Image: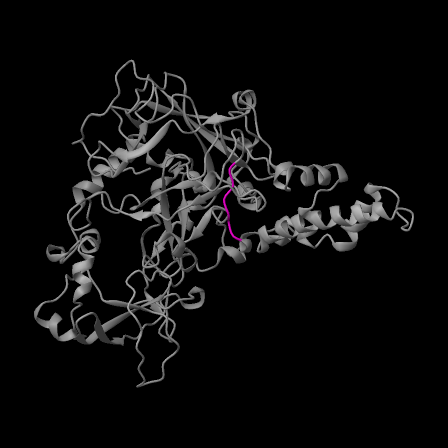
Amino acid sequence: GDETADAKDTENNDIASSTQKAVDGWPEECTLYLARSTIPNSGYGLFTGIDLPKGTQVGPADIVVPFVDIDWHNQGHYKHKDYHFLYSDYIWSGKSMRMRDVGTNVIAMSHGVGAVINSHQGLLNLNENRPKYDPAGLHRSRDVGAGAFSPYHDRRAFAANMVPAGAELFVDYGSNYFISRTKSWGYIPLMNDYQRAEKFLKTFDKLDKDRRLANGTLVYSTREEFWNLTRHNFFNSNKVRVFHALPETLADAEKAIEKGGIKHIIQETKSPEWFENNAKCIDNIRPQASTIKQAGRGAFATRFIPKGELVISAPLIHSPRGREVFKMYDQNKTNGRGNYVRGDSENAAHVGHQLMLNYAFGHPKSSLLMSPYGPGASFINHNASRANTRLQWADPNHEWFSKSVEWLEENNLGGAQLVLDLVASRDIMPGEEVFLDYGEAWQNAWDDYVQNWSPPAGYENWVSAINMNNDADEIYKKLRTVEEERTDPYPSNVETWCSYRLPTLKMGSSITEKWNKLADSTKPQPCEILSREESGVSTTYTVKFLEQKSHLGKYGSMKRIP
């Protein structure tokens, strides 16, 4: 989780009274459930227990954890199966998560709602925003806990329309997600396919009414015969996605026409009794600033949780060789073309791990790592003396417990299969921080890290990116030129980069472009400001783009600053 800790922590100070059943503004009864998805072979899904008006926030906010240049560090590409990377069904592009500057090829996992929720292109009812960057007041120039947890947080989900109680929640993964998996999953309909299918239903109904007015002139005599004929003639191949979007039977087609759309016949709504027997509540905790110093954010109870009751149920993404796959290496060789390469396993310098290692469980003598996910699950911090939860298997007799790590690697089954339940080891009050004892080995490793930690060289004049962003309006009024930086330099941890949407320029040519400080989608590149011209209403800069060389060799796709 956000799992740094030290001995100097504080007690919870926002715990509700003993008579209060939930924190202020939070419902006493569960509103969000984890259960098997209504989509076959899709693992677990997220369901709402209450009606959700459009715009309602769904569950607590997510933390988002980046994977930085993981293909390069593994000398392969997970899409080519050069190495097993079982997170591939759970990741988003780093660019979409505002992680463009973290590395060259960045992908990210949204650990809460974003990991549980499935996608059905005909039933999209949820929107998600992008995370904020906030290291919780910590900075690597002075804080030992900085870098031990992801600063990308507060990614929220909202109802895109009115969602009825009992419905499964779906978000748009994008069409390419399904197109790229056609070989494995078949021709799953996309959003535009459902739109075409809706139009076809209207056309069918009109044609059938016309047919009945001229009955006897056509060879088909029944409405069902007419449905089967038109459905197969219009879309006569199993490889046409629209065909799979249409109702299979006339009865379902008539129901869709009557109710005003296909979604009304494919959307299932579950009863409270079904939830009681088949689902688990997963909105018992939410993130807030942890009471553990240097730990960033923690998980806090939203309602009273009696001893022995479920805190959260967390599916596990398993990585059979996670301890190797998560390793990161120094850029210690060049291939002669200016591209840095990792080198072979004997000569490559192992310099660290992907941050995901801090969000995974594993045995020290096993290569297998398992990452729990679910709303709030990744925020649960370590505290041996104040631990109020314990772990147990949701299914202690699961067949995988008899399998080897090698079997798990060869049988790359999609979706989470194992689930951990976090159970209250004592009564937990509303507003109380939830803790888990990570174990003596973890505590010893952390204590050793704290004892040997020292700030990076040159940290004395570093400035936090948060502080820079807070002063952004003032900074952008007058960006410093190369000449000005000689006498008034920016902090040593700050570089000048330019974002632009320009055609390829020939040597010696120039072009004028309007400045846009929020151009997240533009291409960034290091630059120098040669001059600044100020007028009454605008400022114009002349910049020089600096040369870059890719550090990623064969598996790099973008240029990166040396």
* Residue name at image x 41 percent, y 41 percent: 157
Indicate the quadrant where residue 148 lies.
top left
Spot the residue most to the top. 19
Residue 542's place in the image compared with 416, above or below, is below
Between residues 292 and 486, which one lies in front from this camera angle? 486
- Out of 223 and 407, give the one closest to the viewer: 223
Quarter of the image where the N terminus is located: top left
The spot of residue 186 in percent (x, y) is 65, 50
Identify the residue at horizontal 35%, vertical 54% (top origin).
98
Give the extent of the magenta segment.
Answer: 169-174
Q: Is residue 25 left or right of residue 313?
A: left
Is residue 486 left or right of 133 when viewed as pictured?
Answer: left
Q: Please provide percent x and percent y for residue 178.
A: 57, 52
The main secondary structure of the magenta stretch is: loop
* Among the 4 quarters of the image, the one containing residue 348: bottom left
The residue positioned farthest toward the bottom in the image shown: 508
Residue at the left extreme?
A: 487
How far across and down, in percent of the image, does residue 322 sit? 43, 45
* Placement of the C terminus among the 4 image quadrants: bottom left
